[in-house]
Image (cartoon, coloured by chain):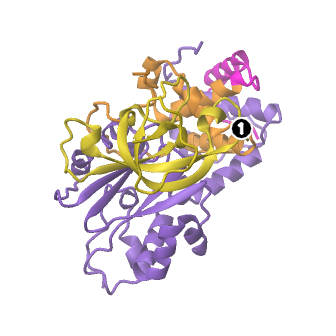
Amino acid sequence: MRPDHPEHDHAHPHDHNHAHGPHPTREDDDVVLSYGEARFLALKGLLIGKGIITADEVRRQHEINERGTPHQGARMVAKAWVDPAFKARMLKDAKAAAIELGIEVTEAELMAIENTPTCHNIIVCTLCSCYPRSLLGEPPAWYVSKAYRSRAVREPRKVLREFGLSFPDAVEVRVHDSNADLRYVVLPMRPPGTEAASEAELADLISRDCLVGTALPGRNTVS
Amino acid sequence: MTDRLITDIGGLPADAVPREEVPQLFWEKHMIAMFNVLWSKGIFNLDEFRRMVEMTPLEEYKKSNFYGRRIDGMSELLIEKKIINRDELAARTEEILRMGTRDHVS
Amino acid sequence: MSPEPSSPYALGARVRIVDLKKAGHVRTPIYVREKIGTIDYFCGAFENPEERAYGRVGSGRIPLYRVRVMQRDLWPDYGGADNDSLLLEIYHHWLRPT
């Protein structure tokens, strides 16, 4: 039977009675110690004590996880825009295409889905929060929200309007529910007026939300 | 129709999508890293974890957030597998809350 | 209910996503059950999450398909365009030819 555990708000002063001096500031030092964090620290301590994991393993994995950023996805898209052969490879096997750019995708399967003049794609995971994390990093809060998970499949055009996007009926809005083993990344269309842009400049036009389908790449002309 | 899993919410009515960016806290990042280490080592698999989240009581699930579900699901799964027991986890959690320490075991 | 066919589905084949009325961990959302779609892509063979969720790993892989369903067929009150569709992944045993 699961115990009741509402979030506690404890405001405790840090205990710095250690021989080796004060700890370096950590990002959360201004945040009250929540029940969730305490539970995590307890669990981690127990597992380390039992020899199941080591603190080093957790640290190393954290460093690996930090490599995932939207910019990795943006680089892939920018290259696909300037190099049709790369684009074809990316659409066929996005994991292999990522390796060409030195990006290691660890999910079992990654598929790039291309936006076209007649089809706009949007990605969701209704059942949980599946997302290509090794490529893009952690998903935004809105992606894992119950509102997005519930509504993106049922009223995608209304959800897109909340993100400032709308499409005529002639453009299909296609929703991908990543409910099993595939992870998806959207390959948006190259905006007009960017013919003179370098690959790096193009990558800067592509935000995280463009890669999920809730934004379109910036239309600023790049000199 | 079969009973719906609590996580099976596609198509249910809901409010506007919350848009605020919520940066990941330090502990949340490390918790995800620990989760990854555990499944990489085969201590549990992702499907077992999802099943555990699906077993959350409905009212608790509704109030939960993503990171809460992850730490709770992971804890329950490790308890189910008898790798830890509920009492020692609860005791250690209370001790950390009481002492107010963030000192990570190293 | 008719048994699952032994051969894989062809691209474009019309299929029904059935409700197996199976308790426990499944990855076929309720909103697509008993809906008709078409095979969009053969994803390959993967271990069955319905088995893995209970620690039964390393058993045989089963075919996984991406299925395309028209939104107007999913929701009676769908407010978008006629051409809008939804794609998701369905394991072989949840599909029947139609």
Q: Quadrant of residue A193?
A: bottom left
Q: Is residue B98 visible?
A: yes
Taking the spot 30% from the left edge, 63% from the top edge, the residue there is A216
| Nearer-the-camera pick, A163 or C31 | C31
Secondary structure category for the residue under label 1: loop
Q: Looking at the rendering, in which quadrant would you find the C terminus of chain A?
A: bottom left
| Nearer-the-camera pick, B58 or C96 | C96
Q: Is residue C1 magenta?
A: no
* Residue A128: % across, % down: 48, 38
* Residue A90: % across, % down: 50, 70
Q: Is residue B91 magenta?
A: yes
Q: Which chain is yellow?
A: C
* Residue B13: % across, % down: 28, 30
Q: Which chain is orange?
A: B
- Disc 1: host chain: C
Taking the spot 61% from the left edge, 50% from the top edge, the residue there is C45
Q: Which region is colored magenta?
A: B79-106
Q: Amino acid at mark 1?
A: Val
- Mark 1, Cα crowd under 10 Å, few <14 / some 14-19 / many 20+, is few
Q: Quadrant of residue A144?
A: top left
Q: Which chain is purple?
A: A
Q: Is residue C50 above or below residue C70?
A: above
Q: Is residue A139 visible?
A: no
